[in-house]
Amino acid sequence: MLKFGLPLAILLASAAPVMAAPRATPAAKALHESLIVLDTHFDTPANMASPSFDMRVRHQPIDGSQVDYPRMIEGGVDGGFFAIFTPQGPNSVQGNQAARDHALLRAVVIHEMVAKNGDVFQLVTRAEDAENLAKAGKKKFVFISMENGSPVAGDLSLMKTFYDLGVRMMSPVHFANNDLADSATDPKGPTHGGLSPLGRQFVAEANRLGVLLDASHASDATTEQMIELSKAPIILSHSGVRAAYDHPRNAPDELIRKLAAKGGVIQLNALSGYMIDTPPNSERRAALVELDKAYGDPNVLPADRLKAYRDARRAILAKYPVPRATIDDLVKHIVHAAQVAGKDHIGLSGDFDGGGGLDGFDDITDFPMLTQKLLAAGFTKDDLAGFWGGNALRVLKQADEMKGK
């Protein structure tokens, strides 16, 4: 683990060299822009926390970020779920309290961004509000999600606190097991055999509040139990399919079928390490570790030091390049998920600003090209309307309508 608790594969992906991608045809772009387009997992709040980051400015390729307001316009993106991501710390009273405090501050960052840019962004909590904003075309909608339930693991009453702050989607776990559930990627293996007793209460409380449950990063057992226990459909906000690439973060077909049978949705992820083999490189790892020791947390660096850090990081990755999946690999995951779950149960998250990005699919401006690829794969306009937003908004609406039942 390196800074922010992120594994090396994620950090490498987020800083991979960007190659120019082909642009969509005018016809594909026009069709794309006629749809409600959302991404269910933007890690952009981590960038927003930096004083040097402005959502009104088109950043990339200056700093490697992947989401901002100008590119939302260019990519035909109407909005999305902006994640309160909390790295997993110790499973202790102190660890859970630190997670709580981190998440509260990250929620404030999202609210501050919307308040400062209220002419072009609007915080929403209901699917209908997002639909209305998209149709009006004047503002981008901002949903808030919580990635990793450790901020509420010490006290589940905090779920209502975060609900009142606008959070409408929550996942119980991230890269490592916590007090709520087992992760798909904890090297120690399972702790609870899925959900802990507290995790089962987490599911029930989410249902009571009307919060959409997210099983991305959860172990297979955790995911299956969430599907069975939840009264409302659940979502995998940024996951792949294991049949296309065998990785524990990707969902096996039998779970995808169970998810769809309960009305749920899988949002296909665009993180290269979950799509192709990315062999470790000890020299690259050592160079990146030394870089982080020299500069510290890039989110708090002054502008001149931040530029030097990014330049040095790019030089390391140019010297020791990381194999990268392509947009065609992403299409394979999408097509397979459509065959297994049905086109009413799939969607998209690039996992941008959190490690996502592929050759030909580097940021949100490449969304129209994915529309073109899916048209070529046999998707209709109605299929794409569900894929790009309708399916995710449906399960969000169902979670709200079924609250308290």
Image: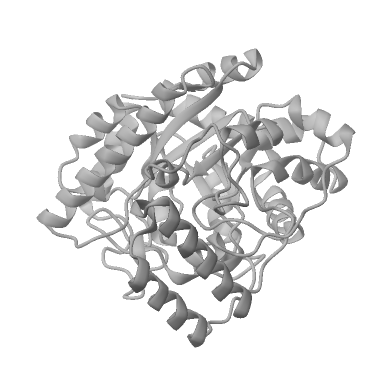
Position of residue 163 in the picture relative to residue 322 (left or right): left
Q: How many marks?
A: 0
Q: How are the residues colored?
A: one colour
* Residue, far bottom: 282
As drawn, is 1 to the left or to the right of 198?
Answer: right
Residue at 69% over, 51% down: 334
In this picture, is 355 found above or below 118? below
Answer above or below: position of 221 versus 143.
Answer: below
Query: 9 or 228: nearer the eye?
Result: 9
Quarter placement of the C terminus:
top left
- Residue at 21% from the left image edge and 44% from the top image edge: 100
Instruction: Please state the horizontal and vertical placement of residue 212, each as a whole percent of the image.
Output: 42, 35
Seen as rendered, the residue at the extreme left is: 93
The location of residue 350, given as percent across then percent down, is: 60, 49
Q: Is residue 243 above or below residue 198?
A: below
The residue lying at 30 percent from left, 29 percent from top is 163
Taking the view exactly as shown, the residue that stands out farthest to the front is 304
Q: Position of residue 116 (x, y in %)?
A: 41, 24
Q: Nearer the viewer, residue 166 or 288?
A: 288
- In which quarter of the view is residue 260 placed? top right
Percent across and percent down for residue 320 are 59, 80
Which image quadrant: the N terminus? bottom left
The vertical placement of 102 against 165, above or below, is below
Identify the residue at image location x=48%, y=28%.
Answer: 142
Q: Is residue 119 left or right of residue 187?
A: right
Residue 191 seen: yes
Q: Nearer the viewer, residue 235 or 262?
A: 235
- Note whether residue 217 is visible: no
